[in-house]
Image: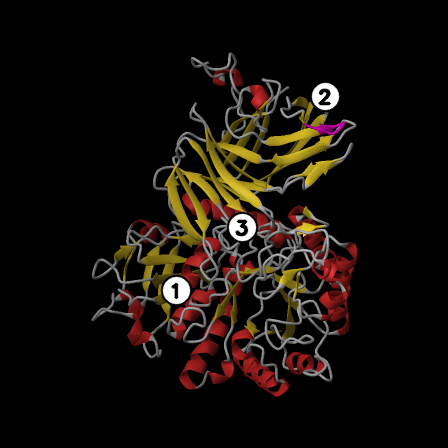
Amino acid sequence: MDPLHLRSAGTSLVISFDSGEAEIIHWGADLGITLPDLAILTAAIPPSSIDATVPTGLLPQASSGWRGRPALRGHRITDGVSGLDFSARLRVLTASAEGNSAVIVQSDPDAGLTVSSTLAMHDGGLLDLRHTVTNDANTPYQVDELATVLPVAPDAVELLDLTGRWCRERHPQRRPIQQGTWVRTGRHGRTGHDSSLLFAAGTTGFGNRRGQVWATHLAWSGNHEQFSDSIGDGRTMIGGSELLGPAEVILAPGESYTTPALFAAYSNRGLDGISEAFYSWFRSRPHHVLPTASAGLPAGKPRPVVLNVWEAVYFDHNLATLIELAESAADLGVERFVLDDGWFRGRRDDRAGLGDWYVDETLWPDGLTPLIDAVTSRGMEFGLWVEPEMVNLDSDVVRAHPEWIVGPAVRSYKDGGRLPLEWRQQHVIDLVNPDAWQYIYDCVDALLRENNISYLKWDQNRDLLEHGHAGRSSVHEQTLVAYRLFDELRKAHPGVEIESCSSGGARVDLGILERTDRIWASDCNDALERQSIQRWTGVVVPPELVGSHIGPTTSHTTARTHDLSFRAITALFGHFGMEWDVRSVEGAEREELKRFVALYKEHRNLIHSGRMVRADVPDDSLMLHGVVAGDGSVVAGATAALLALVSTRTAFAEQPGRISIPGLEPDREYRVEAVFPVPGDADYSHTFTQVRPPAWLADGAVANGRFLAEVGLPMPALNPEHALLLNFTAL
């Protein structure tokens, strides 16, 4: 059987079948069209080892001599005896390819198992890989794990993954690759604040624009593991799997289990190359909200300026106050007004009401219509907060159906069953129960049918601890039925956009992003925290899908105080909005805020379609990042790039010196100008520490892309927690 070779955008994946199983020969740099005889790669047999060469299997297995982590773990249950067929010997039945997609089927007739693997290399180089195991025998087979893995080159010696907590999601950590297994486990029942959005192996010191990187992402919103596995012969695999609970997947004869997709990207241009592969895939999806026509796809709807009223009113819902907010928002240029928590029956605080998804008649005697009319008559869309997967004990739905609460016991808590610990005074509703699922669907469906709602902020404010249905672990099923809830509501209401919020950024993954139109990266609107949160969210997720809001002058979550320009420049590189009582913004500050709203509207097509670039700045107190238009797509006189120079703390040197500007067309000339702040702005004097900033800052600079990349520009010294926005006009 001839080898399989998938190629795209500088990446190759080669799979050989010479050993009888599917073996990954190469995943990395493009190898060109012609491959040599792959027999030249047959490895030596070391002493004190199995008497055969051990393949790097698409499904690593002990039956081939693999001494690392196996892909498939499970066992058969026959006549009450478990543990049978514990080690499969999968061999290739068929392998077919069409374009850059392939299906490989491997089977072990003795164990009664077949595994079908689907692979797709997308145009931007992103690889999509998943497996399906089918029970071919006439007795049950329990799946304990089915992992999706890929090998990385011996040059990969460092690991980078992400971790965090509430209001500090997605911060990087690095470690050397050493012999053994490094596992990142998520047992939250949701993706988790500490989940690693990206799991990357790379060459020594790989950075934003330098080094080779091999990276994966597991598209799953439930329990999961991501790992690297380095065995004694020097080979390293990286990958991920759903973390299944006890007996969560037992396949009856003929039944199958399919893994979440593992998305993988290779780059010889650092992490920015990884981002380009993910962004290309996101933006090529037919359902992606495209801001401009590109890649043969039609233009979509620009991402509207958002006002969310949570930090303006919290639970104090008063129609007159909210209409004042709508008037103020419309004056600023807001295009979407979102009413947050507190509108539904019995919801005066966070202790009651969850699950009773009916407009509170005592607060809203005429329903939401008066507020919706006030919003839409001012040219804005109306959005609403919901949390359909959660309930409070103090709610009508729990009083009527205590058995709908998720827990470890077979009996409901009313009948003596044990409840999991509360989290934010709430519990999880058991969507695996068909009646509970239908109730939630009907409630949200009715809200959308009976009201002019364009947008749902869909929250999920707790982990799924001790998550069970009928006394058995059920995170796997709950995740799938939650997906189905999103899917069915989207099908019934295709014009309604949905945001995934989960205590901020605790459910950010490509599984949920297949069903939602943006994510809320964090409950923290502190611009300093957001610089890092958005930078590392943006390594995978493009800015048009990342909610990014200007918060109040003093942050609700950190008590830090920042100038408007720093907060606004931070929010600009995402799906821009505000979470602030904007009625309080007056005078010069209000005019400055209006300028930022107008600036976002002017440049959102660029921000939401261009290439994200991040410079490798030697001083780690500085960041230079932004968006560059696609090569050759900008006419003379138009903005070709928008970049931000950001100071996160005091610098070691008294001035930053010259900083290279990445990503521009080498032979094209650009005029570089400061946009915010400029002389006359209220924040100008706070921003710079120098007696006299570089001369070009006042008058602009003209240079070609090669000069800007190789020589750079002298940058002004910024005060800590300040930013400078730069515009690059193509000449």
Residue 273 in magenta? no
The alpha-carbon separation of the residues under discs 2 and 3 comes to 41 Å
Q: Residues within 10 Å of mark 3 (few under 14, many from 20)?
A: many
Image: magenta residue range: 77-82
Residue 675 or residue 323, whichever sits in front: 323
The residue where tag 2 is placed is: 109
Residue 81 magenta: yes
Query: Is residue 124 among the parts visible in the rendering?
Result: no
Q: CA distance from mark 1 to mark 3?
A: 25 Å
The residue that disc 1 covers is: 528
Is 187 drawn above or below residue 37 in the view shown? below
* Dominant SS type (magenta): strand
Considering only order in the chain, which callout, 1 or 2, is on the residue closer to the N terminus? 2
Q: Position of residue 376 (x, y in %)?
A: 66, 78
**Mark number displayed over residue 663:** none
Task: Give the quadrant of the C terminus.
Answer: bottom left
Q: Please name the residue that numbered disc 3 is placed on.
A: 279
Question: At numbered mark 3, what does the secondary structure look like: helix, strand or loop?
Answer: helix
Amino acid type at mark 2:
Pro
Any part of residue 276 in sight? yes
